[in-house]
Amino acid sequence: MNAAGDGRAGSRAAPDQRAAALLLAVDPVGLGGAVLRAAPGPGRDGWLALLRAALPAPGAWRRMPASVPDSRLLGGLDLAATLAAGRPVAERGLLAEADGGVLLLAMAERVAPGTAARIVAVMDAREVTLERDGLARRLPARFGLVALDEGIEDEGVAEALRDRLAFHVAPAAPDASAAPPDIAAARARLHAVVVPHDVTRALCSAAAALGIASLRAPMLAQRAAVAAAALAGRDSVIAEDAALAARLVLAPRATCLPEAEAAPSPDQGDAQEAPRGEGSDAPLEDHVLDAVRAVLPEGLLAGLGAGLRDAARRGAADGRASARHTTPLRGRPAGTRQGELRAGARLALVETLRVAAPWQRLRRRDVGPRLVVKREDIRLRRFESPQETTAIFLVDASGSAAMHRLAEAKGAVELLLADCYVRRDRVALIGFRGRGADILLPPTASLVRAKRSLAELPGGGGTPLAAGLDAARGMADSCRRAGRAPLLVLLTDGRANVARDGTGGRAQAEADALDAAKPLRLAAVPALLIDTAPRPLPFAKDLAAAMGARYLPLPMADAARLSGAVRDAAA
Amino acid sequence: MDSLPGDHGRGGGATPVSRRARAPRAAPGARAPYPFAAIVAQEEMLRALLIAAVDGSIGGVLVLGDRGTGKSTAVRALAALLPPMRAVEGCRFGCDPGDAAALCEACRGRGRRRAVEAPVPVVDLPLGATEDRVAGALDIERALAEGVKAFEPGLLARAHRGFLYIDEVNLLEDHLVDLLLDVAASGENLVEREGISIRHPARFVLVGSGNPEEGELRPQLLDRFGLCVEVRTPTDLPTRIEVIRRRDAYERDHAGFCAAWEKEQARLRRRILAARARIAGVEVPDAALERAAQLCMALGTDGLRGELTLIRAARAHAALEGRERVGDAELRAVASPALRHRLRRNPLDETSSSARVARAVGELFGP
């Protein structure tokens, strides 16, 4: 999606990256901050060093891990100090500690939605509203946030955060050559900078032309333009500032290419372009993989994954197959809560003692000098287990598909399998041909097995699409029962010609297929239909709609080379 | 008022209630909220909030929608807009001196209740708040320093007679949702802690906002909201430019911007007061009741709550618009927010709830 686009757009322009750091130093609070999309390394360190050097005054420079408990994030009761002092002493959280400086969010792509929501609430209010542990405080928290995004492929920073952070940069090489300009003077000038109306208009229309819905984007762009003018010692924003702001703020957020006349400044081309193959000297296998990759939009599985999570929540809310797995005993710690200590619950001992501690003086009146822990003090650990996904590949191995592009379809599946492996998903494989469907591979985490059974999948025979869909639904149901989230990937040319009862006939077969597709949508199984036909028929699209699937035609490539290469690769 | 260990609270209001300031002080340099009157577009959201300000019994407002559309700005702006209320002097819960039935225990025990003007509370329930601060608990300070059991009211007490706002309501922890549902249903909050038991009135307008992409709301909570509005990013350029301009002006000079809008704010405030005075006299003819029932039947909404909210909201809307009776126009204006979250989900129907309500309204009331 957008994430990889940032990288390419950013890596071209080292001066722009430098500008982003400097502008952020001028107005960290107003600009919100930046998403730094890069693996740890000299590029990222260089950018951060530049920012740090540019910041005037010794402001706070705090680093925050992605999974930070509320007590550390927002603050709470400092128990030791409280007991020592005999009065409640508040402990400031990281957000309040970062006031007046910069907060680095490490591994920002792993930040849970709840944590992201807490951070953005504080950024919006510019203060921490602390309502914890018997304390009610409001603490100033004006900071710039730098989200260190180490996500690979489709992982990325939570939208709520991305939306509020002005710059999205992928720093390439450190550029510490020139000394930073006078940031303090720029800050002093910031409030006096005038924004001509046509600049506001230009930024707004550029945002619209680039398909950016959120109003925060032009707002942040305008602030960036103001900071740029202040930095250059101007008291009015000029076109150059607006162009820089558009490149830095708007371009990485673009969702569509601007129409020829619309956008005034941003240079957008690269961000949208799909990666190409490396040329003819690269191994053919890579070339094939690249070619298939080019037609699978980036972030495809990620997008489906997001839909999947939504569907999971919906399922839970409706009381249907409870997809959200609230395991009390394992997963990632998600804070504590008050509750009864029963079988299956895990006591949070320290937290319980923390809760009990302030009341000891009171309780000792009744029972004498010993530690009194009451039932209402009991705190239990809460865990969130990331739900495991099972990707079910439903592959059309009929004669028509085999003739067309079964091999290429296999190649596509293999790519997706690799993706599943990266995401630690389980995979299952169902093939359908002739008169029915076969489960070739029950859900497994073994990619090798999946590859092997895929390679062994023979082709030929009719297309019993309905039978395939029925089998997929059965497997999806059993995945749900096992607490996993199913994800269905159907590869077919859509030429259904075998009905449910095994008889031939296109009309009945298509009707049956549509019929079999509906329950999948009712069950809200996230699905993707990859149309492998050389000339896609409207039926495949109808089928995708009936099963609530995303539809993706795989256009014709150099079929001979593709299939040959995939055969070699699979051998 | 001193503590009586072992006293069980009920009757006589013997449990001391902490008398620290009702709300924590704002951080120095905190900004005045963006003026409600200066919000650009988003008519449906503003109307719903005004309706809730006129008739608190509507049951709360849920604002769902895109990022960066000013959801939380609008709700936080309410605090500065709402006309002050009358409250019993010295009451921690801000009891209404005119409503004897809803008084807290302490006020009931009071011989003479002096009324003072107080601002209507708009209380933020931040994510990450702990249960003790939401429901109230013992005053930790007095427990430590004096060894005294005194009740420290929480956010629910602070929000009594006002608004309780939860941003990102779909991310609120389940145990807090349970607590809220319980209190919202009963209108009072019961806290049992360290052997004391406190019961105090907690009636508030629940306002939630969120982005549906972050997760869906539990149906029980969804049902509690009287009105549900959907906000979209404005798409026409002049509106978008105006939003940016005003926001920029506000960011540069909070005080000046607020002062410039104070006249408009005062006008809105008068409109709310006038509507409150008028609402009891707004006539709801049988024909309108019938229309509302037909609409709900056509949409197949669950239960009677939809109809009730529809009528109430239409009446408040009529009062705000200075009209004498509820007619088709008023029903039409509030049909979507009152009903869109009460439709049964039909997985085979792709159309959004809003579109379904609009279609039913069109079929019933004509284009």
Image (spheres, coloured by chain):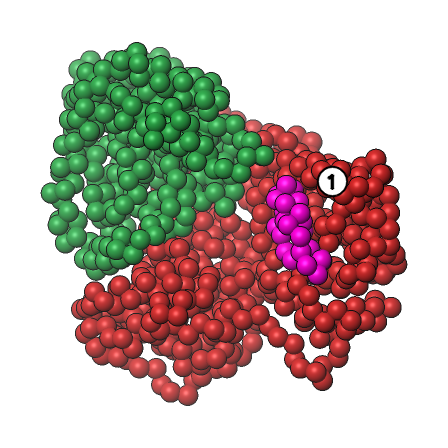
Chain colours: A red, B green
Chain under callout 1: A
> Please, is residue B155 above or below residue A195 in the view?
above
Does residue A546 belong to the magenta stretch?
yes
Q: Is residue A129 left or right of residue B323?
A: right
Q: At 75% across and 60% down in the image, what residue appears?
A: A409
Q: Is residue A57 left or right of residue A93?
A: left
Amino acid beneath label 1: Ala
Whether residue B6 can be seen here: no
Give the quarter of the figure containing the N terminus of chain A. Answer: bottom right
Q: Residues within 10 Å of mark 1 (few under 14, many from 20)?
A: few
Residue A359 pos. (x, y %): 46, 34
Q: Which residues are magenta?
A: A529-553
Kindly give the residue lying farthest to the bottom in the view shown. Answer: A177
The residue where tag 1 is placed is A507
> Please, is residue A55 above or below residue A299 in the view?
below
Residue A344 pos. (x, y %): 69, 34
Most foreground residue, B202 or A521: A521
Whether residue B346 can be seen here: yes
Residue B366 figure quarter: top left
- For label 1, the SS is helix
Q: At 43% across and 84% down in the image, what residue appears?
A: A176
Give the quarter of the figure containing the C terminus of chain A. Answer: bottom right
Q: At 80% across and 55% down in the image, what residue appears?
A: A400
Residue A107 pos. (x, y %): 55, 62
Most foreground residue, A29 or B95: A29
Does residue B132 belong to the magenta stretch?
no
